[in-house]
Amino acid sequence: MRFLRSTAAALVILAWASAAPAQTQGPSDPTAVTPEYCRIPRSVFLDGTRLELTAKRLVKGEPITIVALGSSSTVGLNASDRSNAWPARLEADLHRRLPGRTIVVHNRGRPRDDAEHMLQRLDAEVLSLKPTLVVWETGTAEAVRQMDVEGFVTHIQAGIERIMRAGADVMLVTPQYSRETARLIVYQPYIDAMNAIGARRDVLLFPRFEIMRHWVETGQMQLEGLTPAQVAGIADRLYDCLGRQMARAIVYATEPETGR
């Protein structure tokens, strides 16, 4: 079992960071329209949940501070540069979608962190920045290590409570997906738990697992059979796609009507 866990962890690191080879604009161009290979249907992620506090600040023209809390993929594992991690790409696409707004995204990812350890650093590293919105990516480390789901739920609920008391919105981000890792790692209990928490607490959920699965199943992305050299060269594209789709979800959740 120990070998399986270490192998699965390695596959998570190596298998997820890939996208289809066709590309017309690079991730360094935040003004570009969403590339075809990044696109997903609305039905994949739009659940109607609103980011009320963020929406109010946007209406008033006030600055928006977003803190990305997460583990290895939040840090930007295998990206060519930290500026190509998904929090940086999220900030770039929010500037494209909301021109003239003051929006800053802080990256508070830490490699291999689980929800319990993120909770321990929540006050000092996240809430001290007085965020408008906390984008909380979690669940992958727990699934890889087969950690207790009830404990996972307890930690997330405690974190959401503290974030809300501090006057910020929350967007939960589910684990990452590839066919190889999904065969070895049981993600669904953690995803189900996050969905249940989101529904119970009226918290926006960004279903990264479902989004990445859509990209794989439609052939928009290739996430298997990659060499380390390929992973290193393509990781930027996936982070860019995730950042763009997170920005889309945030804008949708802050606008009063559809057409988002």
Image (tube, grey):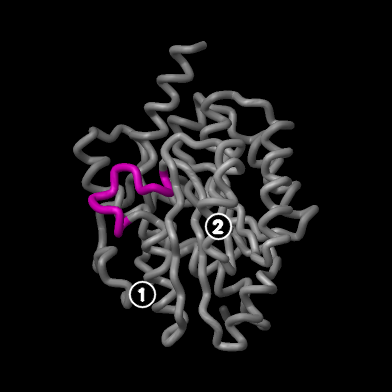
Residue count near mark 1 (Cα–Cα under 10 Å), binned few <14, some 14–19, many ≥20: few
Residue 250 location, quadrant: bottom right
Determine which residue is flagged by label 2. Answer: 135
Q: Please state, as top left, top right, bottom left or bottom right, where the C terminus lies in the image.
A: bottom right
Residue 178, percent from left and from top: 45, 38
Secondary structure beneath label 1: loop
The reply to whether discs 2 and 1 touch (Cβ–Cβ < 8 Å) is no
Q: Residue at x 58, y 49 (%)?
A: 122
Q: Residue at x 32, y 72 (%)?
A: 30
Closer to the camera in the image, 136 or 181: 136
Residue 136, percent from left and from top: 56, 52
Height in image: 239 above or below 55?
above
Magenta range is 73-84
Height in image: 223 above or below 48?
above
Closer to the camera in the image, 236 or 111: 111
Determine which residue is flagged by label 1. Answer: 33
Q: Residue at x 63, y 64 (%)?
A: 46
